Amino acid sequence: MAARLGKIRKTLYIIFAITISVLLFLYWQNDTLQVTRYSLKFSDLPADFDGFRIAQISDMHGKTFGKRNSRLAGRIRSLDPDMLIITGDMMSSTKDDSEAFLDFLELFDNACPVFMCLGNHEQIAELINEPVYNAYIKRLEDRGVILLDNKKATITRGKGKINLYGLTLELYHYSGRDSGYYDENLFPTEEFIEGVLKKPESGFNIMLAHHPAYFLQYASWGADLVFSGHIHGGIVRIPFMGGLLSPDRVFFPEYDAGLFEAGDSKMIVNRGLGYSVINIRLFNRPEISFAILSRM
């Protein structure tokens, strides 16, 4: 009898240890922040921007890290960025979870200039409830966010300047539930981008574009550096294969996460912070991208 009880007790200990290990692993994968660092060299970067530091976050969807997103704000502030770029979907279209982002902005307290482009969830939210969306945008701007909704900003440093563009795609440029149909002939061409942003100015051009699938079009338009998100890192990242599934229900999307290059153009795809439909991340921790620009 004692031997049997001992075996039962041992089995329970093993189950308990496995359960705790799994819970700790899931916490680490879903609730701890990873900073991915990039050192990017460009021949046409103005000399005064050599060493310019850019932090990027994306796809928060109401996710919090610490009380009122204090851990997230503190982690980004510790990087001492010259600029924070936000590449959309900081709220969800189906529920009002925008306070998480607004709290972050309040605690970040304009530690550096903050620029943002829209994601598909913000666009859908505007269609579903325009007054709520407008109030959200006003609160962002009251907290110092510079929203680039098919707009351009110029950043100066010393005698140099760089151009910063925020591209808002049409919802039909997204596949899956956000559009109802999808046709490769409807890809955003260089002409489409010129239609909303005009031709890029001479000099160094950075583009904020939520969806990374059209990197070649962005590069063809004239973007030297692109910041994107949307893919959530593929939700589950499989070693040596990359992200499993995009929000557009594309398996193993080409531009899932990390750094991509096309000619002289580069693109950083941020893995995002939160969830959209599937509320779990595996081998795909919430991410802050951090790039330091330098001249060749």
Image: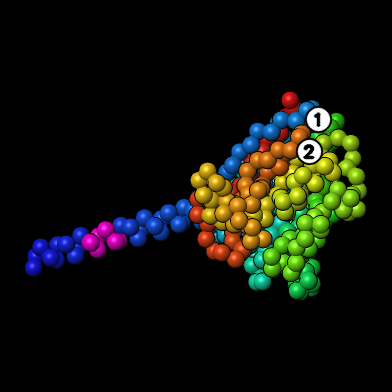
Residue 201 left/right relative to 214? right
Give the quarter of the figure containing the C terminus: top right
Relative height, residue 192 to residue 55 (above, below): below
Q: In what element is the residue under mark 1?
A: loop
Q: In what element is the residue under mark 2?
A: loop
Q: Nearer the viewer, residue 64 or 223?
A: 223
The amino acid sitting under disc 2 is: Asp
Q: Position of residue 276 (x, y in %)?
A: 61, 63
The amino acid sitting under disc 1 is: Asp
Q: Position of residue 95 (x, y in %)?
A: 65, 71
Q: Position of residue 287 (x, y in %)?
A: 59, 49
Relative height, residue 285 to residue 38 (above, below): below
Tell me where the magenta segment starts and ends, as one range.
11-16
Relative height, residue 258 to residue 124 (above, below): above
Q: Is residue 179 magenta?
A: no
Most distant residue in the left direction: 1
Which residue sits at x=82%, y=42%?
220
Give the quarter of the figure containing the N terminus: bottom left
Decide which of tag 1 and tag 2 comes sooner along the chain: 1
> What crowding class fits label 1: few (fewer than 14 Cα within 10 Å), some (14-19), or many (20 or more)?
some
Kindly identify which numbered label has been placed on residue 44.
Answer: 1
Which residue sits at x=82%, y=54%?
188
Residues tagged 1 and 2 counted as in contact (Cβ below 8 A): yes
In the picture of the structure, the residue carrying the numbered disc 2 is 224
Q: Nearer the viewer, residue 31 or 205?
A: 205
Residue 31 left/right relative to 37? left
Query: Overall secondary structure of the magenta stretch?
Result: helix
Relative height, residue 74 to residue 176 (above, below): above
